[in-house]
Every structure is written in structure tokens, then in C-alpha cells.
């Protein structure tokens, strides 16, 4: 009986000592759905109380998928047994890539046994996208000369990169300039602001034969066609992350990604008299899906619908042609004749189904929505063209000369002459 009495007293004492009250959280700032702009620093303040102890406070910002965004703030009150805490911390919205939308602050308080959670929603307005400048790239055969154009088109030397040239691009998300050599040199990434090399991978070429035959950049990834067949992808750190095959005796010359599902290639034959091919592989596995033979030199590949790819280029007689590739069947058709344009030198998409084509000394629109062509600028010689839709500017290169037009008014805004023929024009954005 005495033992039973001791046990009952012990259990009663334990139940009295157990903390069953959760901490109380009162937040005065921010208020619910408060608007916050990119670059803002806001104050998170309020009062936290508990009947016995406040051990740990954690503050995270979460997106709609409940994934933590930006940094986590933790606070541990310095005095053990503290029953109140005056919360007063700053939270910085310094991520340039953070998208507009509703986010939730999760304030979690632990008293050693119990946890209380409070959510406060904010409405975030992302950083405004801005152009930091323009890069113009040429190559002498031994090195690439890169010049920087300010937004008023004043130029200054930026950097020289050893090696020949197959392609270059700007990774504004990671603030890198990507440059790839064709047969000797490196695949490299340069920090845009500081000009230092972040990483590089040597090109195992045997000049003058090219090691790489095609270059494509998309969503922080580089895709390179190889002379001996196949495609090698690299991520933003220079690590291999994708591969797919080509037909025996063929190499990738151009590529693009359709609907975030297919890796689409123009495959050229090593024996030049053979026909080229368009092939599709699964983007995430590299496994081959289908292909079609084409007697056609591709100048541009674009997504039209989920099941349709549009190819612009030149036929065997060097006349402009537009081809529709049907993904379900793998069939090709050319119901729209544009041979009167002459030979296409370059092209780009300005809106869905509308393409600007440089051909035969003119710039013309090709509209597959209504099967029409229209002169944009006549008497303008162009080897290559680029469009910056943020600043609404068209860049036209002819040899080493670059002309910049206001796209809407077609008025000349500026010009620049490079040290050699212009290979690429790149637009640098803040994000």
C-alpha cells in the first residue's frame, strides 16, 4: 500500500510539472498582405510570451509550395526561464530572382515542450528587370575580342578570351558570360562584374578540325554538338549533365528545346552530299524519340504549338523555305512558299508565329499565322540580327558593322564598328 501511494504521488507530481501551455505570439509588423518591393528591408516586430520559458524563435519566408525562401532567422533568448521576448528583427528582400506573388512569414516559437506557429502573409513585387549593357563578340581565329556597349552605345574593351569560337551567351541569372571554343581553347564562364574566370573546361580538339560543331544555351545549361557525334550538356558549374546521340556519320549543328520536353537537333552529315536530319530526344533522359530527313539548311527552329515545330532556312537551291514538323507523326510539310525572299542569312521570332528574316538585302516579316510576308526594312544588308524585347531594339550586323534600330519606329538609334566580323551580340540584364 505504501508503494502504491508513493507511485500515485510521483505521477501526480509529474503531471503538475508538465507544461501544457503553448507560447503566445503577437505580431505588429508586418501587417497581413503588406506590400514589399524587391530590395526592401522590413521590420518584423511583436511580443512573444510563455508561462514558463521561451527557448527558440525561428522565422522563415515560404512560397506557395511551402518551400523556404531567402534566409532563416533564429533567436534564442539569452536568459533561461525567460517568459517574454520583444521581437525586433530586420528581414532583407535582396534576391533579384524572387518572383512577384504572395509569400508567408512563418514565425515558430518553442518553449522546450510546446511549439506555437503564426503565419503572416505579404505581397511581394519583384525587382524591375533592367539591362546593364550589351556585349559584342568577334573572333580573329586565335582569340575572341569582347567589347562592352553601354546603353547609350558607347564602347569599351571588356576582355579577350584565347581560342577559336563556336558560341557564347549571357547567363543573367548567375551573372556569367559563357564562351565556348570550337577546336582549341576552353568552355568557360566569366563573372560579368569582376571579369574573373569562374570555371573552365579544356576543349580536346585537334585543329583545324572542330571538336564542337554546334552551340545552344538554354536555362543555365550549355548544349554542345560534337564532331564525332552526340551532344554533351554542361550545367552552370561546368559539370556534365546531359548527353544524347546522333546518327552515325552525323553531328549536331543547331538545336533548341521544345515545350520543356524535347531536345530538337539539326543533324548535319559529315559527307556533305548526304541529306540532313531533324531529330528529337527526350530532354530529361536523352533517349532518341524520332527523326525526319530534310534537304534543308536550318537557320532557325521555333515552337509553334505543342505538336508543331517551325523550321526556317534554305533549300538546296539556296532559296528561303519554311517547314512544319508534326511531332505526333514525325512528318514534315511546306504549305507556305517563301522562296521569293531569296537566301535567308538569319532570322528570329518577334511574336508567336511571326519571324523577322534577313534575306537578299532586306528585313522582312514571315507570318505563318496568315501565310504572308511583309517588308520591315528594305536595303539593309545583314549577316546576323538580334532583338532585345526589353528595350525594344533591333541589332543588325553586317561584317564588323553594327546598327541599332528602334524596333517600333524603325529609326536608327546608334551604330558601332567592331575589331573584326561580329559573331554575337549579347544582352546583359540584372537578373
Image (cartoon, rainbow, N blue to C red):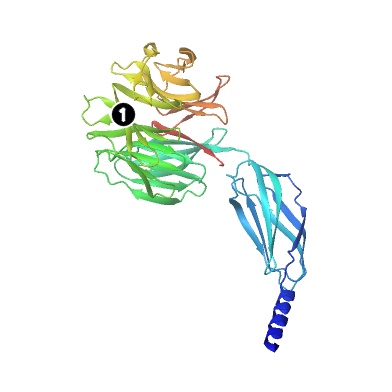
Q: Is residue 410 left or right of residue 340?
A: right
Q: Residue at x 43, y 42 (%)?
A: 221
Looking at the picture, how far across and down is residue 367, in whole percent? 47, 16
Quadrant of the rendered image containing residue 254: top left
For disc 1, the marked residue is 291
> Quarter holding the N terminus?
bottom right
Q: Nearer the viewer, residue 270 or 34?
A: 34
Looking at the picture, how far across and down is residue 163, in whole percent? 33, 43
Examine the rendered structure and indicate whether residue 176 appears above or below residue 153.
below
Examine the rendered structure and indicate whether residue 352 appears above or below residue 217.
above
Q: Is residue 220 left or right of residue 182?
A: right
Quadrant of the rendered image containing residue 11: bottom right
Residue 73 visible, this orientation:
yes
Q: Residue at x 46, y 21 (%)?
A: 355
Local packing at callout 1 (Cα closer than 10 Å; few below 14, some 14-19, many 20+) is: many
Looking at the picture, how far across and down is residue 97, in whole percent? 57, 44
Examine the rendered structure and indicate whether residue 122 appears above or below residue 83.
above
Looking at the picture, how far across and down is residue 255, in whole percent? 37, 33
Q: Nearer the viewer, residue 383 or 121?
A: 121
User: For the residue labelled by badge 1, is the local secondary structure a helix, a strand or a loop?
Assistant: strand
Q: Residue at x 54, y 32 (%)?
A: 153
Amino acid at each position: 500500500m505504501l508503494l502504491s501511494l508513493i507511485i500515485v504521488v510521483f505521477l501526480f507530481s509529474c503531471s503538475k510539472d508538465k507544461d501544457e501551455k503553448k507560447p503566445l505570439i503577437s505580431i505588429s509588423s508586418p501587417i497581413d498582405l503588406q506590400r514589399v518591393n524587391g530590395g526592401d528591408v522590413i521590420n518584423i516586430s511583436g511580443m512573444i510570451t510563455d508561462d514558463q520559458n521561451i527557448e527558440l524563435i525561428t522565422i522563415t519566408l515560404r512560397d506557395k509550395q511551402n518551400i523556404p525562401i531567402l534566409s532563416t532567422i533564429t533567436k534564442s533568448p539569452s536568459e533561461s526561464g525567460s517568459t517574454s521576448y520583444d521581437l525586433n528583427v530586420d528581414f532583407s528582400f535582396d534576391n533579384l530572382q524572387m518572383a512577384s506573388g504572395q509569400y508567408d512569414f512563418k514565425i515558430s516559437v518553442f518553449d522546450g515542450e510546446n511549439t506555437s506557429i503564426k503565419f503572416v502573409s505579404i505581397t511581394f513585387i519583384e525587382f524591375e528587370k533592367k539591362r546593364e549593357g550589351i556585349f559584342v563578340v568577334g573572333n580573329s581565329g586565335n582569340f575572341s575580342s569582347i567589347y562592352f556597349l553601354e546603353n547609350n552605345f558607347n564602347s569599351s574593351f571588356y576582355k579577350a578570351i584565347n581560342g577559336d569560337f563556336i558560341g557564347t551567351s549571357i547567363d543573367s541569372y548567375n551573372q556569367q558570360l559563357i564562351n565556348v571554343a570550337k577546336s582549341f581553347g576552353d568552355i568557360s564562364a566569366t563573372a560579368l562584374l569582376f571579369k574573373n574566370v569562374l570555371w573552365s573546361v579544356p576543349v580536346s580538339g585537334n585543329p583545324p578540325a572542330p571538336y564542337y560543331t554546334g552551340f545552344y544555351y538554354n536555362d543555365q545549361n550549355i548544349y554542345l554538338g560534337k564532331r564525332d557525334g552526340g551532344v554533351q550538356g554542361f550545367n552552370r558549374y561546368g559539370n556534365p549533365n546531359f548527353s544524347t546521340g546522333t546518327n552515325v556519320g552525323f553531328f549536331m549543328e543547331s538545336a533548341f528545346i521544345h515545350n520543356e520536353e524535347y531536345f530538337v537537333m539539326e543533324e548535319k552529315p559529315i559527307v556533305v552530299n548526304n541529306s540532313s536530319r531533324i531529330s528529337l530526344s527526350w530532354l530529361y533522359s536523352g533517349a532518341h524519340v524520332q527523326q525526319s530527313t530534310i534537304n534543308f539548311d536550318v537557320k532557325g527552329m521555333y515552337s509553334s504549338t505543342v505538336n508543331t515545330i517551325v523550321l526556317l532556312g534554305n533549300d538546296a537551291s539556296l532559296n528561303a523555305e519554311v517547314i512544319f514538323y508534326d511531332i505526333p507523326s514525325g512528318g514534315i510539310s511546306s504549305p507556305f512558299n517563301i522562296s521569293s525572299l531569296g537566301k535567308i542569312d538569319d532570322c528570329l521570332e518577334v511574336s508567336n508565329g511571326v519571324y523577322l528574316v534577313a534575306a537578299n538585302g532586306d528585313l522582312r516579316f514571315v507570318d505563318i499565322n496568315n501565310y504572308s510576308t511583309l517588308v520591315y526594312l528594305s536595303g539593309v544588308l545583314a549577316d546576323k540580327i538580334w532583338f532585345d524585347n526589353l528595350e525594344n531594339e533591333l541589332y543588325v550586323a553586317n561584317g564588323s558593322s553594327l546598327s541599332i534600330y528602334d524596333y517600333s519606329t524603325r529609326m536608327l538609334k546608334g551604330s558601332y564598328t567592331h575589331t573584326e566580323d561580329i559573331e554575337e551580340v549579347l544582352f546583359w540584364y540584372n537578373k
